Amino acid sequence: MSGIVQSNIVRSSGTIAVAASGLNWDSAVITASTLTAEGGKGYFINTTSNICTITLPSAAEVGDQIVFVDYARTWGTYKIVIDSNGLNYQGDADTFTVEYNTSGETLDIVYSGASKGWIPQNDDVVVDAPVVPPTQKAIFTFGNPSSTHLVNSSGVIAAAISQVGTAKTAGAAGTYGGDKAVIFGGALNSGGATLGTTNLISNQGVVGSDVAAAAGVRTTADVNGSTYGGDKVIVYGGYGSTSNNKYNLINNVGVVAADATGAPTGRQGSAGSKFGSSGQAIFAFGAYSGQTNLSFIVSDQGVPGSNVTGVGTARKYLACSSFGGDRCVFAYGSNNNNLNLSNKVSNTGIVASDTSGVGTARIGTAGAGYGGDKGIMAYGQVSSGKTNVSNKISNSGVVAADTTGVGDATQALMAAGFSNSA
């Protein structure tokens, strides 16, 4: 062995070993609002819930290095603030404010001496963030009458299977955890009382039993849901003036957060879907004092944006499905007459004008993505009663003609994608 050996450890056998070199990484993820950093260490900083103020060492030697990593890619929402603790930072005195507020950033600083002090040798953004694999299968479940149908990665709907959980209609659905689905809320088929329960659906398409609502979670029906942030779900709107402007976030393990306010115009019977490449969602249409064609976008952090004046026919009780990997389409619904119109949404969230629909005009249908980049809408209520018709959506957003459905004719059901495996 040649060179200089440092930090030797004498083992019991008498063999000399070299201790590990490089930074000493703190194994604990930092979630607190403050951190006192040490030279020669690396830190994973999670600002999901708050800003983190980092105090650097009050004394440093030339070559001392500290690295900070945006653990949850949330510095753009809650920044980090650097307190240089009496030493200069890039030549500026400690009286200057130093902040980093770009999601996905890594900050690598080294001490250069009294004149320039701490200098970033790397403050790049990691832009090649992992992307959640697209779901391959879909599930249509509950409704009136209550039943469950699985859709394979080719868009073929299977016959009805045994239903687990309380029979209900008009709830919300979305994909969480990347490959599982969740059902939220709805109204009892027997009696119409609204619910705040959830049912988790495994990546094998197995519907779990009812999970009681946590404290602060509302009961509501005519609510709708969408995936956001790649692996979480937002449910919005609902029946009644006390519920229709609220929303709930569901995390990537299927836990429903308490009611939140701040969403735009409250409404019921709207529809929503993910879109774009950064984990956004869009909700549009619905009713609050008559039908509307307003829309709003939800950020990849689950924050609802402002109303956008809609394009297309105002209507309610429609469906929405993703397609093409980064777009979605709204279709069907009612403006006091059943419609078979559709409206595509671009990968920047622009709702297009009406396209004359293909297939049976109906309400109470549901939509979900399948096969990675395609969609399907199925079931619903037509003028003559419930139907089991379905319509596939290509990866360019073309709604196909009717396919005679399989299984139970039903309406006001819920649908979502699941499974990353074909």
Image: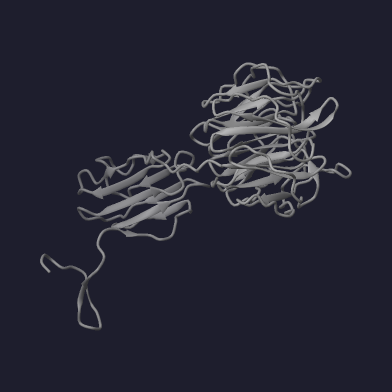
Closest to the observer: 177 or 340? 340
Q: Is residue 118 visible?
A: yes
Q: Position of residue 68 (x, y in %)?
A: 36, 50
Q: Is residue 281 visible?
A: no
Q: Quadrant of residue 233?
A: top right
Quadrant holding the N terminus: bottom left
Q: Quadrant of residue 9?
A: bottom left
The residue furthest left is 2
Q: Position of residue 394 (x, y in %)?
A: 58, 28
Q: Residue at coordinates 73% horizontally, 45% vertically from top-left?
A: 148
- The total of numbered circles placed on residues is 0
Compared to residue 360, the image places residue 302 above or below, namely below
Compared across the picture, whether 217 is left or right of 103 comes to right
Q: Residue at coordinates 61% horizontally, 29% vertically from top-left?
A: 393
Q: Position of residue 84 (x, y in %)?
A: 32, 48
Closest to the observer: 315 or 379? 379
Compared across the picture, whether 19 is left or right of 265 comes to left
Closest to the observer: 189 or 184? 189
Closest to the observer: 224 or 141? 141
